[in-house]
Image (spheres, helix red, strand yellow):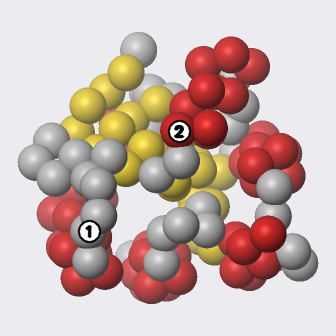
Amino acid sequence: MKFIVDAQLPVRLARFLESAGYDTIHTKDLPNKNATSDTEINAISMRDNRVVITKDSDFLNSFLTIKEPYKLLLITTGNINNLELETLFTANLQSLAELFNNHSYIEITHDSIIVHM
């Protein structure tokens, strides 16, 4: 599974996912860095079959209307520090990977994973 981590999430999350063995890029890794447009991120996601990890509801809107990005992980924790975010992913990464085998839109909160059909 491959990921692209959106600008409002820390580079630390992308590096954590890389260290867990996942092909991951952060928008800061792209030529336009965090100024990369949502359209461009969607195009990369579609081209490379990457799950977009974001807090941005604009990606949800495009997913629901035009089925882009390829797959979506929406983080709805509100403000969360980097350590809490990493702990959340540590506890749920295996489940998320398994769920993305059969689902395209998943939401993660402080205490649950919600699979949207």
Residue underneath mark 1 = 80
Indicate the position of residue 51 as horizontal and vertical percent values. 58, 48
Q: Is residue 21 visible?
A: no
Residue underneath mark 2 = 57
The image quarter containing residue 25 is bottom right
The image quarter containing residue 32 is bottom right
Residue at the location (23% across, 82% down)? 83
Q: Is residue 65 visible?
A: yes
Graded by Cα atoms within 10 Å as few (under 14), some (14 to 19) or many (20 or more), the crowding at tag 2 reads few
Distance in Å between CA atoms under marks 2 and 1: 17 Å
- Looking at the picture, tell me which residue is in the foreground, 47 or 34: 34
Instruction: Judge left or right: residue 53 versus residue 69.
Output: left
Instruction: Judge left or right: residue 22 versus residue 97.
Output: right
Look at label 1 and name its amino acid: Ile
Placement of 54 over or under 86, stated as above or below: above
N-terminal label among 2 and 1 = 2
Residue at the location (26% across, 31% down)? 114
Look at label 2 and name its amino acid: Ser
Placement of 116 over or under 34, stated as above or below: above
Graded by Cα atoms within 10 Å as few (under 14), some (14 to 19) or many (20 or more), the crowding at tag 1 reads few
Indicate the position of residue 68 as horizontal and vertical percent values. 71, 31
Q: Residue furthest front?
A: 79
The local secondary structure at tag 2 comes to: helix
